[in-house]
Image (cartoon, grey):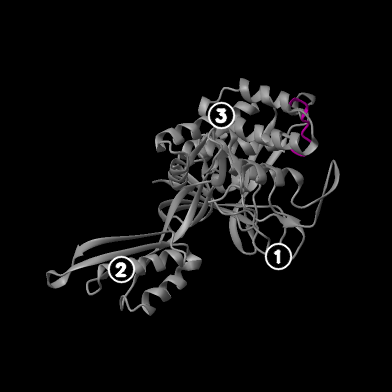
């Protein structure tokens, strides 16, 4: 599986992303050809400079603009949208560019409380923004990865001067993008006040990335390094790594519906314990926090019939379960490995059905935006016994009333 991993210890910005991708082999001509379609209307020149930050090399993007009156770039979203829609890019590239820009426009509309058609970009309403977005999207289109991962971007701290006056960091549009795409922002380790993650950089990763977080381990095939313009108390760089192999770590999907959850699997094979003791022991594991416990018969050494007991647990509960394994004298050895699962967001609640009874239920967010619901089977049995109706009848009443679901908690894993 071909994977791009963007590591952004110094934050995210459009020019750093573009510089990193230009530093990868084979991308420059694709980026330049895609930008040439913009250059037919607006006079600019894209160049790169081999530079260093704190002694470390990378590419710095330099954009030079012409001075003619026709070179004035529009700053209203509706005008920029027309430029994108009428450009001669491939459909898939155009979708990437449009998605990024429209996300910026939607965030601006939310921040300013206006209709998206009235959005007026200020700092973002420049030809540099379009160049960065087109260049990054063109490079990703060319590389065609199976998935993209980005580390959690640090925001920086302090204030920044804008056309709206002095704003706190992170600026409102960055916060709105993080909220909309459920991106976990990282705290900054720098000591000098600075804006590290910009709206353009975050919008690009929000729309192009599959996951935010850090892979557990990986093998790097190629590296591209883009440099920022600010002088920080640490190297100001962004790295894009093309990975051959990797192990998923604590990652989260940008759409907010699918989450990667890190787990620990514990397992032991036991051949000298009764089935009654096994039943008690597995119940103890569940009560101690195991997400699931399974028990299967296995053929062990000397042709003995034994049990394979497996417990799946969250990492912060692994030590508690480990203690139970050994204190119960069930085994003198325990297999343990890091594991994980993709899981959908869900929330608990209840539904009042036609029979006047309340049935506990669970709502689930699907990746395509649908919300499905499932009744608790124990409640269906309880209501069936209380009313004398069949379980199937109670289930039908439940689904007829499912729109009346009352949530009892926020969406969670």
In depth, the one of 156 and 412 nearer the eye is 412
Task: Quote the CA–CA distance across marks 3 and 1.
Answer: 38 Å
Residue 124 in the magenta stretch? The answer is yes
Q: Residues within 10 Å of mark 3 (few under 14, many from 20)?
A: some
Residue named by callout 3: 95
Residue 89 appears in which quarter of the rendering?
top right
Q: CA distance from mark 2 to mark 1?
A: 58 Å
N-term-proximal mark, 2 vs 3: 3
Give the side of residue 302 with respect to residue 366, left or right. Answer: left
Rendering coords of residue 128 (x, y %): 70, 37
Is residue 27 visible in the rendered image? The answer is yes
Q: Which of the labelled discs sits on residue 233, or is there none?
A: 1
**Rendering coords of residue 333 (x, y %):** 31, 76
Tell me if 200 is positioned left or right of 399 in this view.
right
Depth check: give the residue in front, 307 or 170: 307
- Is residue 265 on the magenta stretch? no
Identified at 64% across, 28% down, the residue is 39
Identify the residue position indicated by label 2 in the image: 278
């Amino acid at each position: 599986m071909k994977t791009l991993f963007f590591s952004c210890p110094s934050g995210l910005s459009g020019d750093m992303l573009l510089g990193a991708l230009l530093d990868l082999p084979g991308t420059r001509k694709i980026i330049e050809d895609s930008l040439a379609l913009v250059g037919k209307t607006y006079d600019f020149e894209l160049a790169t400079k081999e530079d260093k930050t704190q002694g470390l090399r990378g590419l710095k993007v330099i954009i030079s603009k012409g001075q003619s009156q026709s070179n004035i770039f529009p700053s209203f979203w509706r005008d920029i949208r027309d430029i994108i829609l009428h450009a001669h890019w491939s459909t898939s590239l155009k979708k990437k560019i449009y998605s990024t820009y429209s996300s910026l426009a939607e965030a601006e509309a939310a921040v300013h409380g206006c209709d998206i058609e009235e959005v007026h970009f200020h700092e973002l309403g420049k030809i540099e923004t379009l160049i960065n977005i087109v260049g990054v999207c063109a490079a990703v289109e060319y590389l065609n990865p199976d998935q993209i991962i980005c580390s959690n971007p640090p925001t920086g701290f302090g204030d920044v001067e804008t056309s709206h006056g002095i704003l706190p960091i992170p600026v409102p549009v960055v916060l709105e993008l993080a909220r909309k795409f459920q991106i976990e922002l990282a705290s900054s380790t720098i000591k000098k006040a600075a804006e590290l993650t910009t709206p353009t950089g975050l919008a690009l990763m929000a729309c192009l990335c599959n996951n935010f977080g850090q892979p557990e381990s990986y093998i790097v095939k190629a590296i591209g390094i883009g440099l920022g313009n600010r002088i920080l108390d640490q190297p100001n760089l962004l790295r894009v790594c093309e990975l051959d192999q990797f192990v998923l770590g604590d990652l989260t999907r940008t759409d907010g519906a699918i989450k990667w959850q890190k787990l620990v699997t514990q397992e032991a094979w036991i051949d000298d314990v009764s089935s009654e003791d096994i039943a008690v022991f597995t119940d103890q594991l569940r009560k101690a926090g195991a997400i699931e416990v399974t028990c299967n018969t296995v053929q062990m050494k000397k042709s003995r019939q034994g049990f394979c007991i497996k417990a799946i647990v969250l990492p912060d509960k692994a030590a508690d379960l480990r203690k139970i394994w050994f204190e119960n004298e069930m085994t003198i050895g325990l297999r343990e490995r890091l594991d994980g699962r993709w899981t959908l967001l869900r929330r608990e609640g209840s539904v009042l059905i036609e029979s006047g009874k309340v049935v506990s239920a669970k709502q689930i967010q699907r990746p395509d935006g649908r919300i499905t619901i499932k009744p608790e089977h124990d409640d269906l049995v309880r209501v069936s016994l209380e009313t004398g109706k069949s379980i199937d009848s109670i289930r039908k009443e439940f689904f007829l009333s499912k729109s009346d679901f009352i949530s009892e908690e926020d969406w969670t894993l």
